[in-house]
Image (tube, coloured by chain):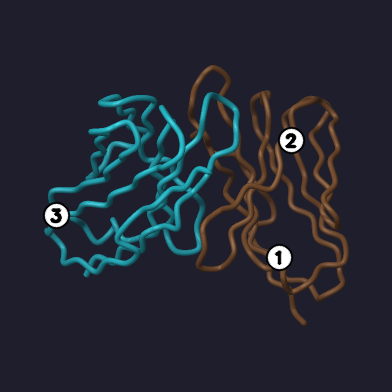
Amino acid sequence: SQTIHQWPATLVQPVGSPLSLECTVEGTSNPNLYWYRQAAGRGLQLLFYSVGIGQISSEVPQNLSASRPQDRQFILSSKKLLLSDSGFYLCAWSLGTGNTIYFGEGSWLTVV
Amino acid sequence: GQQVMQIPQYQHVQEGEDFTTYCNSSTTLSNIQWYKQRPGGHPVFLIQLVKSGEVKKQKRLTFQFGEAKKNSSLHITATQTTDVGTYFCAKSTSGTYKYIFGTGTRLKVLA
């Protein structure tokens, strides 16, 4: 069966520090991968998605970047965090188009 | 933007009352999905609707897709405390791999 893991689960970082959130999917090949952000009590904002290794589509220009170095690995990064980067970051995967999207457990980021 | 609008944003109901959330899009949808996010958790898939006018039921939950495929609703009959959470609709843009989520409806059930 397919599983998705993301880490770390919680993170407290000072303003201006770098960020790296990692996500891996097991049990499937060539998944579509996604990073969403959810501000406290708010909706899900699509940040990046990837349909293959090295292919990244950015939805919202901002202080973040994403990379897909391997088929089932998706990384969210920042060189210098801002206070506004705080939130709940969710990695997700799907297959094909129009199918179910499966989320990881999420990573809580607090920028102080 | 590309967000799908949901109403209401919040809903507090007494346990046993019914609850409905509505999802509206300005464009025709190829399909609509519904997800539930428990407090502190991640969204979990509930159901997908594809056909115009489609109605699907899961126990106390009834999902409908509008005839014009521009709106959808989720109705919960006789809410229970386990129904607490945020309900999201989501659309996948035809021909792309993007999933755009609605603004969500946060449900609180008072015992």
Residue A18 tag number: 3
Please, what secondary structure does the residue beneath circle 2 have?
A: strand
Q: Residue at x 84, y 32 (%)?
A: B54
Q: Amino acid at mark 2?
A: Asn
Q: Earlier in the sequence, mark 1 or mark 2?
A: 1
Q: Is residue B65 left or right of residue B27?
A: right
Q: Chain of mark 3?
A: A
Graded by Cα atoms within 10 Å as few (under 14), some (14 to 19) or many (20 or more), the crowding at tag 2 reads many
Query: Which tint is chain A?
Result: cyan
**Residue nearest the viewer, comparing A49 with A22:** A22
Q: Which residue has dot 2 on it? A: B71
Please, what secondary structure does the residue beneath circle 3 have?
A: loop
Q: Is residue A14 left or right of residue B65?
A: left
Graded by Cα atoms within 10 Å as few (under 14), some (14 to 19) or many (20 or more), the crowding at tag 3 reads some
Q: Nearer the viewer, mark 2 or mark 3?
A: 3
Q: Residue at x 37, y 40 (%)?
A: A47
Please, what secondary structure does the residue beneath circle 1 have?
A: strand
**Residue nearest the viewer, comparing A12 with A51:** A51
Q: Which residue has dot 1 on it? A: B11
Q: Residue at x 27, y 34 (%)?
A: A68
The chain coloured brown in the image:
B
Q: Chain of mark 1?
A: B
Label 2, label 3: how many angstroms apart (C-alpha)?
41 Å
Q: Amino acid at mark 3?
A: Pro
Q: Amino acid at mark 1?
A: Gln
**Number of numbered discs overlaid on the protein picture:** 3
Q: Is residue A67 left or right of residue A44?
A: left
* Residue A41 at x, y percent in the picture: 50, 63
